[in-house]
DNA sequence: TTTTCATATGTCTACTTTTACATATATAAT
DNA sequence: ATTATATATGTAAAAGTAGACATATGAAAA
C-alpha cells in the first residue's frame, strides 16, 4: 500500500469507478498512468480492500467497476489520520528560469506564455469540476460541512483553482518584468 | 542526461558548487537526494560537461568543487530552448482532502494547520533567498534584465514566494470553511 | 469501407527515486 | 571523554514511474 493506493481508495470511497475512470479522475490530484493503476487495483482486490463487478456494456467495451470494501474503508480511515507529507515538486520551469540568462528574449517569453496557457486550460477544467461538485452536492442534499462527501472535494478543487490562478499571475507578472521600457 | 542533470548544470552555470552544496541548493527547485546527485556529477564529469577541483579545507572535510565546462554550457543552452514540460505534482494533501469526510474535526483542522506551518517556514526561506539574490545583484552591479544571471533566479524565487503565499491562503480559507457558525 | 478515435484492460522494460548502508572530518555541546 | 551535529562523499537495494508494447470493442468520420 503506497500513497497512490490510498489515493485510489480515496476516490473509490466516494464513487464506484473502473480502472479507466480512476486513471482519468486522479489526473488533477496526482500524476499517474494507467500502467501504475491497473496492477495496484489487482493487488488491492486480492488483499480485500476493494472488490469489482463486471459491467457488460453494449455501446463500449465491458469494464470492471471497483468498489471499496469495509476493510478498505478502515484502511483509508487510518491513513487519513496520519499527517500529510510535504508535496513533491518537480517543475522543469524552475530550472529553465534559473538559467534564463542563456535564453533569447523570444524564447524566455514563449516559456512563460506556454506555461500560462497550460495553467489557463487547467483552470478551465477545475472550474468545470467545481460546477459538477456543486450539482452533486445539491443532488445529495448535502451542505458544506465536514461530514458531507462533497465538502472535501470542494476544498480540494478550490485549492487547485487557487494554485492555477497564482501560477497564471506569476507568468503574467514575469512577462511584464521581461519587457521593461515599452 | 535527464532533467535533474540539466538542473545541476543550471545551478553550476551560475556558481561553482560542491555536490553537498548542490544537494542543498536544489531543494527549493526540485526534490532530489544526494544519492541521486553524486552519481550524476560523476557521469557528467566523465562526459566533459563539468569539471572539478579538490578543495582542501581545514575546518571541514575536503570537497570537490564542480564547475560547468564550455561543452556543458552549450548542452544547457540547447536544453533551455526546448519547451518546459508540465510540472509533476504529487501531494498527499489532495488525497486527504478528498477523503476528509472520514476525518474527525480536530484531525481535519490539524491537517490544514500543519500544511500552513510548513508553507510558512518555506516562505521564510524564500524571503531569505530573495534578499541574498538582491545582495548578489548589487555586488555584480546587475540590473533586472534578461541577460543578468541574477534575474532568472529573482523571477524563480518570486514564483516560489507566490506559490507559498497562495498555499497559506488556501489553508487559512479552508480552516474558516471548516468552522462555520462560530 | 477503411481509418480514426474513445473506451477499456493489461504487461514489460528502462529509468528514476527513495531509503538505507557506509565512511570520514571537524566543531560544539554535554 | 563522549556524544551530537554539520559537513562531505559515496554505494546498493528496493520501490516507484514512464513509455512502449499489446489487444479488443464500438462509434464516428473520411
Image: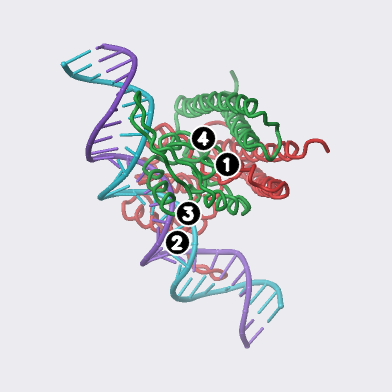
Chain colours: A red, B green, C purple, D cyan
Q: In the image, which disc is placed on residue A94?
A: 1
User: Closer to us: mark 2 or mark 1?
Assistant: 1
Q: Are marks 4 and 3 on the same chain?
A: yes
For the residue labelled by badge 1, is the local secondary structure a helix, a strand or a loop? helix
Q: Using the image as rendered, state which of residue C24 and residue B97 is in the foreground.
A: C24
The CA distance from mark 1 to mark 3 is 17 Å
Instruction: Using residue A109 as the reference point, say whether residue B90 is left or right of it.
Output: left
Q: Residue furthest right?
A: A182
Disc 3 crowd rating (10 Å Cα; few below 14, some 14-19, many 20+) is few
Q: Are marks 2 and 1 in contact (CB under 8 Å)?
A: no
State the quadrant of the C terminus of chain A.
Answer: top right
Q: In the image, which disc is placed on residue A64?
A: 2
State which chain disc 3 sits on: B
The CA distance from mark 1 to mark 4 is 9 Å
User: Closer to us: mark 2 or mark 3?
Assistant: 3
Q: In the image, which disc is placed on residue B28?
A: 4
Q: Quadrant of residue A58?
A: bottom right
Residue beneath the point at 73% across and 36% down: A177
Q: Are marks 1 and 3 in contact (CB under 8 Å)?
A: no
Instruction: Using residue A46 as the reference point, say whether residue D28 is left or right of it.
Output: right
Q: Quadrant of residue D2?
A: top left
Instruction: Using residue A96 as the reference point, say whether residue A176 is left or right of it.
Output: right
State which chain disc 2 sits on: A
Which x, y percent locates residue B97? Answer: 51, 37
Residue beneath the point at 50% across and 59% down: A20
For the residue labelled by badge 3, is the local secondary structure a helix, a strand or a loop? loop
The CA distance from mark 4 to mark 3 is 21 Å
User: Closer to us: mark 4 or mark 3?
Assistant: 3
Residue beneath the point at 48% across and 47% down: B4
Amino acid at each position: 500500500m503506497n500513497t497512490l493506493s490510498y489515493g485510489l481508495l480515496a476516490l473509490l470511497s466516494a464513487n464506484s469507478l473502473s480502472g479507466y475512470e480512476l486513471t482519468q479522475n486522479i489526473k488533477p490530484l496526482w500524476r499517474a498512468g494507467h500502467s501504475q493503476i491497473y496492477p495496484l487495483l489487482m493487488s488491492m482486490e486480492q488483499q480485500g480492500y476493494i472488490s469489482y463487478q463486471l459491467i457488460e456494456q453494449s455501446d463500449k467495451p465491458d469494464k470492471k467497476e471497483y468498489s471499496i470494501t469495509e476493510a478498505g474503508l478502515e484502511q483509508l480511515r487510518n491513513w487519513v489520520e496520519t499527517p500529510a507529507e510535504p508535496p513533491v515538486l518537480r517543475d522543469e520551469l524552475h530550472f529553465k528560469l534559473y538559467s534564463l540568462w542563456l535564453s533569447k528574449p523570444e524564447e524566455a517569453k514563449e516559456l512563460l506564455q506556454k506555461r500560462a496557457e497550460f495553467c489557463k486550460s487547467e483552470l478551465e477544467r477545475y472550474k468545470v469540476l467545481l460546477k459538477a461538485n456543486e450539482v452533486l452536492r445539491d443532488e445529495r442534499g448535502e451542505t458544506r460541512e465536514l461530514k458531507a462527501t462533497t465538502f472535501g472535494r470542494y476544498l480540494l478543487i478550490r485549492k487547485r483553482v487557487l494554485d492555477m490562478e497564482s501560477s497564471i499571475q506569476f507568468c503574467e507578472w514575469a512577462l511584464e518584468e521581461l519587457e521593461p521600457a515599452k
